[in-house]
Every structure is written in C-alpha cells, then in structure tokens.
Image: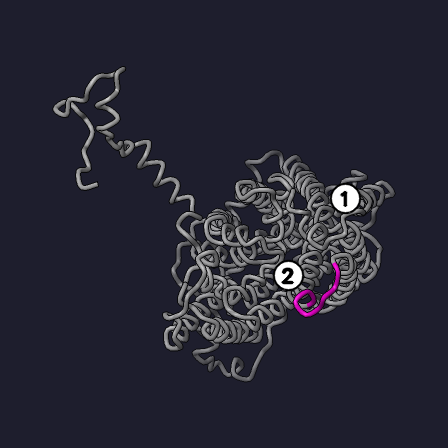
C-alpha cells in the first residue's frame, strides 16, 4: 500500500488453480460443442450457430467481445492518470445501440448474410467488398495482437512466468476452443467470462474500499485529486478528453464496432428473430454500463490507495498498464486465490475478444475470399473454416510482438479502430442511407478517408500533443518510504510500453507548424469521425458527378421506414391515441335488422364522401 516497500510478485498454488480452472472451463466448452454439433458440418452452423441463439447469451457475448483486458487493465489506469471523465463513454454506448438497432441491424438481418462485407458487393460491387474485407482483416489482426499481449504483460508482473510464454498460452487456448466449437462455443464461453471479469473487479474494489474505511473516503480522495472531472465542456477539439470528445468521438468508434464489425454483427444476426436480436443489443447495453462502472470504480480505488506514492513515477512498475496488477498483489496478495481470480478476469477479457476475432476472421475469409471463387462442398468449407481459425490464431499470436511497440494500450486500440473502422463505417452509411451513392463514390471515399485517417494517426504519434492539451493529472511520490535497492529487486526486466515522445529539430527550435499545432494535436477520439465523415462527403460528391442519381437500388439494400421503431410508434399513436379512422358502410348499416336503419343526422364519425 501507499508508502510501504514494494510488494513481492508471486502466485500461490491456489492462484494457479483458480487461473487454471478458468482456462479449463473455456477449453471444455469448445470440446462440448465440437461433440454435440459433430453431425452438423455446414459452415453456417460453425460460423453462425445455425441462427438459433437467444438474446441473453448473445448479449453477454456482445458485452465480452470488446470488453477485453484493455478494459480491465487500461481503463482503471486511464482514470488514475486522466480522471473519471472517460465514464461519459456510457452515453456513447446508448447512442451506439440506438443507431445500430435502428439503422444497421434491420438491413443485415433482412439479407441473412454471414459476412457483413457481402452487403458491399450487393450494394456496390465486388471490388468494394474485397477492399472492405482486407481492411477488416488488417484491423482485426492488429487489434487482436494487442489483446493477446496485454494480459501476458499483467501475468508476467504478478508471476514468474515468461512474458512470451504467457502470450503464446493465451493465443493457443483461444485458438483451441474456436477451432473446435465455432460460434456457439465462443458465445457460451463469453457468458462465463463476463462473470469472471465482474468477480475480478469486485474483489479489487471491495478490498480497496475496506482498506480505505468505506466508499466516501475513496470519493473524497478522488475529489481532492481532481479525478471527478465529469463536467469538462470545453469545445476545443484539441483537448484530449472533454464531454464532446468522449461522447461524440466515442459514438463513432463504438458504432464502427457494433454497427458494422463482423465480430459483433455475426453475433446479433445469429439470433432466431429480429426482436431477439434488438433485445440482445439493449441487454448488452446494461452489461457495458455495469463493466464501465466497475472499471471506473477500480480506477478511483487505485488513485485512493496510491495518492501519495505513485508506483509508476517511483519506478516500481515500467508502464501505467501494470498499475492494476501491482494493486492486486499489494492489497490481495495475502488472500490466496484472489490474485488468481483477478488474472483470470484479465485473461477472460482477452479470451473472449480473441475468440470473437478469430471466428469473425474465419467467417469473412470463407464467405468473401474462398466461397465466391471455388466450388467446394459444405463439408469441405466447414473444415476450411476450422483450419482458418487455427491459422488466424497463430497469426494473431505473432502480431502480439508488434503490440509491445505501440505505446499506451487504450489509445493504441482507439487509433486502430479509428484509422480503419472509421472509413468502413462511412462506407456502410453511404450504402444504407444514401440511395444515390454508387461504387465509384464508395471506393473513392474509402481510399481518401483511410489515407486521411492514417496520416492523422501517424502524425499525432510522431508529434504527440503537449501536456496542456492532454491534461494528465498530478501524481506524487512524496509519501513513499522505500529505497532504490528495493525498487530494483521488485521491478522486472520488462520493456516500457508507454509511447516515447519523438523530439524533432522543429520542436527543438520551437517553430511548430500549423500541422503540428492543430491537425496532429486533435484529440485521438476524433480519428474515427475524421475517417467516417470524409468517406461520406467524398462518396456523395463523386456519386453526384458520376451519375449516381440515375441508378436504381433495391429497397431491401437500404433502410426502409418500416425498419425503424419510430414508424411503429407513430402508427401506434395514430391508431390508439388519436383514434382509429373509422370507415362507414351505409349499405351494411341500412340493412342491419339488429340495429335498425342509420340516421345520418346522428352519426358521430367523419364521412369520406369522395372515397
């Protein structure tokens, strides 16, 4: 705890047992579904669960898929360094689920597609589909590398397991149950892993609150340390986190994940009805809010415990993403089994994400690259799907090496989804909401949007924004009472993962250009909106000048008014609240013996005489 000598990083036997049980259960689910579905050889059953899944398991799987080790480790560290304003992402979750359920889900479910990128060929052309598929594969492999590397970093800190041994173990377990069990194994394993993530968070939060003497001392420490900075309404787009960057920017990021990302779309269109699919999104919303609450609370507890002796700046750890594992060994080290539970939570987050990614990669490769170009049987395609799951698992393990060079993990993830996911989101918006957008506009917009996003991302990495824009909150080591020798005994030989600012000659002489001062200093949260808006604007302009208004598009490929909940709400109000449009049948009434003849002077309904 604060001011005490460095803690000893070691697992007890029971910790290994708890951690091992989590891996065993995950692998067992894959074996179970491989056995029970052994007679169903079609790739549709393997990749889509036969479209027989219900809302609850799909919702939990949606929650787990992108609530990875990045959430368990990096989100509390983000709160510790920059404050709890990141919690406003919860508003973007609500906006994302609304847009996804009203705009993207109805179209994808109606078409019954296995790969999201099938839509691009139906709406535009084959070249657009192939380019979208390549972008998705690149994005997913890069992201999955980070997700595999992150828990390995944590496990190395609290155990004596080798970093790369832990990395390979993570990837192999995921690849095993994905290759055997397909989407059903992934979904039901995710349900189990959400429970493990919540249990790990609660163990840390409850113990920290007990140590601090209750919830109110934790809140008081956070308030005094400036961590409860929710009300930052500065309109300056250069500020790293404000209300606007976190809500507006994050809505684009999460819509690119839930609206069009194969890993998520594949889940909710595997539901047995459109109603179940929409319900799964909103149940998943509750899960996202709960996990966000836990991660922000853990970050506030982290600050409360180390407010006077920061382990990072004092040299006890080599990266801010190691703060949570360090806290666990500090406050839970005397309770055998609980450190193992937390590491299991970190790994559960990663396993759920990696398994989702591997399954999605196999799906798009089969549907977009192999199936259209071959005449293979369903059984052969099923075996190829399993082989691809194995291949992508190995590839993602290899990409974990690159993740160690990417700097701050949370920001790296959002940059990846921004650079690639943003332009892809713009492409699908063009197709679904703009009937006159054509293939020339779509391809032009996608290429230019990607180039602009990539330029911004690389530039902001080379020329990181100054501290007055990122606003890191103060940390202190004034309360530490240990020696340098103790620090050296504790700290492992792990390379720092924080991004190192690159000092350039231009910065040395203080002559920062407009590009450096303004463009590269935009909040990283705007990477995704930049790509999306560029694709839409360029796509519409090119389409207008290349005859897009003359083309005929099938109505099923675009959003129809009948797809929206607002249409049915409006219809309900008209019929129930404003009264039904009663039609009068005088002939029927005149000859009704039970009621007699109709006297038009006393009729209380409006006659539609022309009709």
> Which of 15/590 is in front?
590
Q: What is the x, y in percent for residue 574?
A: 31, 37
In the image, residue 588 above or below residue 152: above
Q: Nearer the viewer, mark 1 or mark 2?
A: 2
Q: Quadrant of the C terminus?
A: top left
What SS does tag 2 mark?
Answer: helix
In the image, residue 592 above or below residue 251: above
Q: What is the x, y in percent for residue 84?
A: 53, 49
Compare marks 1 and 2 and give the one earlier in the sequence.
Answer: 1
Q: Which residues are magenta?
A: 370-377
Residue 325 visible here: no
Q: CA distance from mark 1 to mark 2?
A: 22 Å
Neighbourhood count class around disc 1 (C-alpha, 10 Å): few under 14, some 14–19, many 20 upward: many
* Left or right: where 605 falls relative to 141: left
Q: Examine the image and state in which quarter residue 160 appears.
A: bottom right
- The numbered mark at residue 409 is 2
Tag 1 residue: 339
Residue 60 visible here: yes
Neighbourhood count class around disc 2 (C-alpha, 10 Å): few under 14, some 14–19, many 20 upward: many
Q: What is the x, y in percent for residue 322?
A: 70, 55
Q: What is the x, y in percent for residue 443?
A: 50, 74
In the image, residue 162 above or below residue 564: below
Q: How is the structure coloured here? A: one colour
Residue 375 in the magenta stretch? The answer is yes
């Amino acid at each position: 705890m604060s001011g005490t000598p460095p803690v000893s990083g070691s697992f007890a036997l029971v910790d290994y047992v708890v951690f091992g049980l989590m891996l065993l259960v995950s692998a067992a689910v894959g074996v179970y579904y491989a056995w029970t579905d052994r007679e169903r050889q079609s790739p549709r059953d393997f990749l889509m669960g036969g479209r027989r899944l219900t809302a609850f398991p799909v919702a939990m799987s949606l929650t787990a898929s992108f609530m990875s080790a990045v959430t368990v480790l990096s989100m509390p560290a983000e709160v510790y360094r920059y404050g709890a304003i990141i919690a406003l992402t919860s508003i973007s979750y609500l906006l994302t689920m609304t847009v996804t359920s009203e705009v993207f889900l109805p179209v994808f479910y109606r078409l019954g597609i296995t790969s999201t990128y099938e839509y691009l060929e139906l709406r535009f052309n084959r070249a657009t589909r192939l380019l979208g598929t390549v972008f998705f594969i690149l994005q997913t492999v890069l992201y999955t590398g980070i997700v595999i590397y992150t828990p390995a970093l944590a496990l190395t800190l609290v155990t004596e397991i080798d970093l790369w041994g832990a990395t390979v173990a993570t990837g192999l377990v995921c690849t095993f149950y994905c290759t055997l069990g397909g989407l059903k194994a992934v979904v039901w394993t995710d349900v189990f892993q959400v429970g493990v993530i919540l249990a790990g968070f609660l163990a840390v939060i409850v113990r920290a609150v007990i140590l601090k003497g209750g919830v109110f001392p934790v809140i008081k420490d956070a308030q005094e340390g400036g961590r409860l900075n929710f009300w930052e309404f500065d309109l300056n787009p250069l500020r790293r986190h404000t209300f606007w960057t976190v809500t507006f920017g994050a809505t684009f990021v999460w819509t690119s994940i839930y609206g069009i990302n194969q890993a998520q779309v594949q889940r909710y269109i595997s539901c047995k009805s459109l109603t179940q699919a929409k319900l799964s999104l909103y149940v998943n919303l509750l899960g996202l809010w709960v996990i966000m609450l836990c991660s922000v609370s853990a970050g506030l507890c982290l600050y409360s415990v180390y407010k006077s002796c920061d382990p990072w700046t004092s040299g006890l750890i080599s990266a801010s993403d190691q703060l949570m594992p360090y806290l666990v060994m500090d406050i839970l080290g005397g309770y055998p089994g609980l450190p193992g539970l937390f590491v299991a939570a970190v790994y559960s987050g990663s396993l759920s994400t990696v398994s989702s990614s591997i399954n999605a990669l196999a799906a798009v490769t089969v549907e977009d690259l192999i199936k259209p170009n071959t005449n293979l049987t369903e059984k052969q395609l099923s075996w190829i799907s399993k082989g691809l799951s194995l291949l992508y698992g190995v590839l993602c393990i290899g990409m974990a090496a690159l993740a160690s060079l990417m700097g701050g993990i949370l920001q790296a993830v959002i940059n990846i989804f921004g650079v690639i996911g943003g332009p892809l989101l713009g492409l699908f918006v063009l197709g679904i909401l703009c009937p006159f957008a054509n293939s020339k506009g779509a391809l032009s917009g996608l290429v230019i949007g990607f180039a602009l996003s990539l330029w911004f991302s690389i530039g902001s990495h080379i020329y990181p924004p100054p501290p007055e824009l990122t606003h890191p909150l103060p940390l202190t080591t004034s309360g530490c009472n240990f020696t340098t020798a103790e620090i050296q005994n504790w700290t492992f030989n792990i390379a720092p993962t924080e991004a190192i600012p690159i000092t350039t000659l231009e910065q040395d002489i203080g002559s920062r250009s407009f590009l450096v001062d303004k463009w590269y200093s935009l909040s990283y949260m705007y990477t995704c909106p930049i790509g999306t808006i560029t694709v839409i604007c360029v796509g519409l302009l090119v389409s207008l000048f290349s005859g897009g208004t003359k083309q005929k598009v099938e109505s099923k490929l675009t959003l129809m008014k009948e797809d929206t909940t607002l249409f049915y709400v409006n219809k309900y109000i008209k019929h129930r609240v404003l009264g039904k449009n009663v039609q009068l049948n005088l002939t029927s009434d005149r000859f009704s013996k039970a009621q007699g003849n109709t006297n038009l002077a006393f009729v209380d309904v409006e006659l539609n005489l022309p009709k």
